[in-house]
Amino acid sequence: MATNKVFRVELQCTYKEWWRYNVELQCGSFDADGQRVGFTTTRQTVAEIGANLPSAPDKTSYKKQLLLESVPCHEARFLIYIIPHTLPKERRLEQTPPFDIKLRTWCDGAEIATENRAVNQWSGTSFEITLK
């Protein structure tokens, strides 16, 4: 018999220009037979893609930390999208190195992993994490 667990992902970023990115976290929750039993999502939209903001908006319009939990399930697949809406002011690649985000994962309230992921300033990033 399969046991149901609640999985959680937390994304944190201290990069000073984090405001230039929209972020979306999605989670598909699946039973032991692979059937989807739930879907959750959260997003942070600071500006429309291509907005080319000249400076950071009010700090209350974006968060440095985002969380998403699954519904009780056997397996959870998290999709993380980090998409720039405003490109860097610098135009030379050597002046715009990737920055890190911290990704923490939990199962039933117990932390199971912490890792850093690099984000390209020009293209952003997307990735999937499967937790069982």
Image: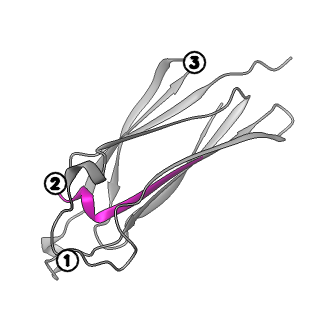
Q: On screen, 126 above or below 129?
A: below
Q: Quadrant of residue 64?
A: top left
Q: Nearer the viewer, mark 1 or mark 2?
A: 2
**Residue to which mark 1 is pinned:** 93
The quadrant of the image that shows the N terminus is top right
Q: On screen, 35 above or below 85?
A: above
**Residue to which mark 3 is pinned:** 108
Amino acid type shown at disc 1: Leu
The quadrant of the image that shows the C terminus is top right
User: Helix or strand or loop: what does disc 3 sit on?
Assistant: loop
Which of 116 and 36 lies nearest the eye of the viewer? 36
How are the colours assigned in the image?
one colour
For residue 16, which numbered disc appears in the image? Answer: 2
User: Helix or strand or loop: what does disc 2 sit on?
Assistant: loop
Amino acid type shown at disc 2: Lys
- Image side of residue 33 versus residue 118, left or right: right
Amino acid type shown at disc 3: Asp
Q: Which region shows up in magenta?
A: 17-26
Q: On screen, 97 above or below 53?
A: above
Q: Residue at x 21, y 61 (%)?
A: 57
Q: Residue at x 21, y 51 (%)?
A: 59
Q: Which sits earlier in the primary sequence, circle 2 or circle 3?
A: 2
Q: What distance separates the C-alpha of mark 1 from that of mark 2?
A: 18 Å
Q: Residue at x 16, y 75 (%)?
A: 54
**Place of residue 41 in the rendered image (x, y in percent of width and height, measured from the top left):** 57, 47
Could you tell me how many numbered marks the image carries? Answer: 3
Residue density around tag 1, few if under 14, some if 14–19, many if 20 or more, within 10 Å: few
